[in-house]
Amino acid sequence: MKFSRNSVVLMVAFLVVSIGCSQLRAQGQAGDSGSTAGTNDSSKLEGLQKELETLKAQLDQMKKQEKKSASSDKPSLAEKLFDSTNISGSVDGYYGLDFNHPADRQAGLRVFDNYQNQFSLNLAELVINRAPDKDTPLGYNLTFGYGNAINIVNSLEPGGIGFDRNVEQAYVSYLAPIGKGLEIDFGKFVTPAGAEVIESAPDWNYSRGILFGFAIPFYHFGLRAAYTFNPKVTLTGYLVNGWNNIVAVNTGKTYGFSLALAPSSKVSITQNYLGGPQTPGTNSHWRNLSDTVVQLNVTKKLALMENFDWGGGDAIPGVNSVTWKGIATYAKYSFNDDNDFAVRYEYYDDTNGFTTGTVQHINEYTLTLQRTFAHNLLTRLEFRRDMSNQPVFPRGVAELVKNQNTLELGMMYVFNIPGAE
């Protein structure tokens, strides 16, 4: 137990007075009790005895107060939660140039960076989160966003875009004492599917691919539980309302799992599956998705990644069960800590026109040059060409053509304020 400075002073005084009393008692016993000196010593002894009792009472009272203070200083659960809270975020904007010069300045088959021939705010994001641990098994994540990206993410919400317009994620976590710890999350969280994410900085290219925009969902609402068996194997299960909906469209639920494997430091494999009814008002016609992502770190400078998606099951007029599928290949080369070059190629088959609105085959390739300034400012210069076997890309006032070329300059500032240890 720690003592304050005043307590230490009182204890020293108590010790000094105690020693003085002992010495006077010894002198009184050795001297003549009838003498004047003996009388004086007896008077001094009585005075010191009273002072000793006073100091003892004060010391006892101060110890009680410090014990009570120490008890009240014990951090509460709320204090523990906020002690390790991390605050991070980013500001992401771009200038896009569509060489087709569409009249409405919107490129075809693009998500987030669809606005062209203008400066645009893609996403301003703030993340407040705490990961649960064994000492404090509760955690949370609140991710807020503003800009075109967050509008697109929440545009399909059955409750309306205003229902959670600026909320990207909002969930609570609990680390259950099962084995090495089973982390259970409840709330709104981003999908496990895909090789790309909503934020630009972690992706290798600035624009999002066709697979990200049309083959997979953006988010889910419900439960997920993750268990890490060892550093090489993590299994996560999902029970959610469906695709891109907090407000359910039927009484069914979507089930799924993610199996993440890391057989070596150079290889990672993630297999995702999601399945459940997504047609409004009925629990039939399950929508199924198989998503596979494989990454290979060939060297410290060169990394490769492959993403394959297959989906289907929904019914549309004239088609009892639709399908879509696609593959994306990525390569990234780091010249040094500040300069990177990335390439992406995609093929997408929207067999029934369910995801893009047109029965078509799409190819696209993207070339991205990244330069980092002062660790936190990322800039990307990107050229992209989209090609379809159908005229779906707007050109001029009212024309549709089969290809589209764009050039973009994206700038991202990222920050992170770690929580207190």
Image (spheres, grey):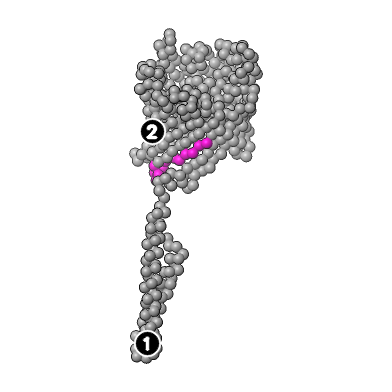
In the image: residue 30, left or right of residue 199: left
Element type at mark 2? strand
Residue 47 vertical placement versus 81 (above, below): below
> Visible in this render: residue 117?
yes
Q: Quadrant of residue 60?
A: bottom left
In the image: residue 244, left or right of residue 147: left
Q: Quadrant of residue 301?
A: top right
Q: Position of residue 150 (x, y in %)?
A: 52, 28
Q: Residue at x 50, y 37 (%)?
A: 127
Name the residue type under label 1.
Answer: Thr
Q: Assign the N terminus to one quadrant of the image.
A: bottom left
Q: Residue at x 61, y 36 (%)?
A: 377
Q: Nearer the viewer, mark 2 or mark 1?
A: 1
Name the residue type under label 2.
Answer: Ala
Q: Position of residue 125 (x, y in %)?
A: 53, 34
Give yes or no for residue 134 being in the magenta stretch. Answer: yes
Q: Residue at x 60, y 12 (%)?
A: 400
For disc 2, the marked residue is 225
* Region of the chain picked out in magenta, as a range: 126-137
**Residue 152 — which label?**
none
Q: As rendered, which of 250 and 298 lies closer to the eye?
A: 250
Q: CA distance from mark 2 to mark 1?
A: 83 Å
Give yes or no for residue 308 being in the magenta stretch. Answer: no
> Visible in this render: residue 349?
no
Q: As rendered, which of 33 and 134 lies closer to the eye?
A: 33
Element type at mark 1? helix
Q: Residues within 10 Å of mark 2 (few under 14, many from 20)?
A: some
Q: Residues within 10 Å of mark 1 (few under 14, many from 20)?
A: some
Residue lying furthest top in this view?
A: 318
For disc 1, the marked residue is 39
Q: As rendered, which of 173 and 328 lies closer to the eye?
A: 173
